[in-house]
Image: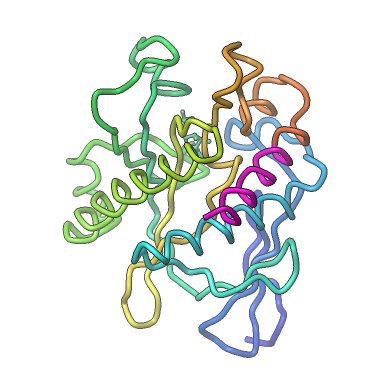
Amino acid sequence: MSVNSKIYEGKAKILYSTEDPEVLLADFKDDATAFNAQKRGSILGKGTINCSISAKLFQELSTQGIKTHFIDSPKPNQMRVKAVKIVPLEVVVRNIAAGSLCQQTGLPLGTVLKQPLVEFYYKSDELGDPLLTSDRLRLLELATAEQVETITHLALQINEFLRGFWERCGITLVDFKLEFGVDSQQQLLLADEISPDTCRLWDQAENDPNRRVMDKDRFRRDLGNVENAYQEVLQRVLKAVESK
Ligand code: C5P
């Protein structure tokens, strides 16, 4: 593989090869998609904002002993990451009912869950990322039983840490999505990104159900002020990291 060739283009990122076969360069895009790319648009500055937020969160998580694919950030919208084979699962952790959980169960928006809920979705654009039962997860052999157990444990540990972190930002962590990958040494690493694109984040200073939204739901639901909300999340993250 030649250096700097595009090896993958997703909805929010482009991955390039580097001189080191174990390292990739991830370019974060301003492009925004929702509802399995049926809705498309662009959020000005999103690439830089999401890359910066993700970089800080990966660094924070690594201080907690969570292994991630993050190496460093050579440019504001670029991240050097360890090359991994992505486990084709979208791991969603929920603290408060929102989004598809409300649509599929009838739970009212904002219901506080007695304990965090970990869900596995099959990462497949063609199939529309369906929710998996544990039997289907086993049937499809998308991950080993040991990986599923480790991922569940890590997802809960990450949730505990991130809840506290976002709390320090004056933000409630409603739910979020994680992806994991396996590197050349067969280590399971947290991959992809953690950003307002992949989390539901509610501003604790706002009670209004629309005004409190600081994440991609502003784009999904045409709530306006998307750029401002993302920028505000970044500013609060930077402040929380600095004031440790
Ligand atoms: O849509 P749903 O309610 O299942 O989303 C749960 C969480 O996972 C939300 O924070 C959403 O932003 C995130 N998610 C994601 N990528 C997907 C699906 C969901 O980041 N493909």
Q: Is residue 196 above or below residue 89?
A: above
How was this image coloured? rainbow
Residue for point 70% across, 63% down: 27
**Residue 228, position as x, y percentages in the image:** 77, 34
Quarter occupied by residue 230? top right
Q: In the image shown, does 181 or 35 lie closer to the viewer? A: 181
For residue 12, above or below residue 135:
below
Query: Which of the pair 60/110 is nearer the observer?
Result: 60
234 or 129, nearer to the observer: 234
Image quadrant containing the N terminus: bottom right
- Residue 138 in picture, x, y percent from top left: 19, 49
Residue drawn at 34 percent across, 82 percent down: 185
Is 182 positioned to the left or the right of 221 in the image? left
* Residue closest to the far front: 243
State yes or no: residue 55 in magenta. Answer: no
Answer above or below: position of 223 versus 135: above
Q: Residue furthest right?
A: 44
Percent position of residue 71, x then y: 55, 75
- Our reading of the magenta stretch's main secondary structure is helix
Task: Determine if the magenta segment contains residue 235.
Answer: yes
Which residue is painted at 62% across and 65% down in the image? Answer: 8
Q: Residue at x 31, y 37 (%)?
A: 119
Residue 107: x and y in percent read 35, 12
Quarter-wise, where is residue 68 in the image?
Answer: bottom left
In this figure, what is the number of numbered marks?
0
Magenta segment boundaries in residue numbering = 230-244
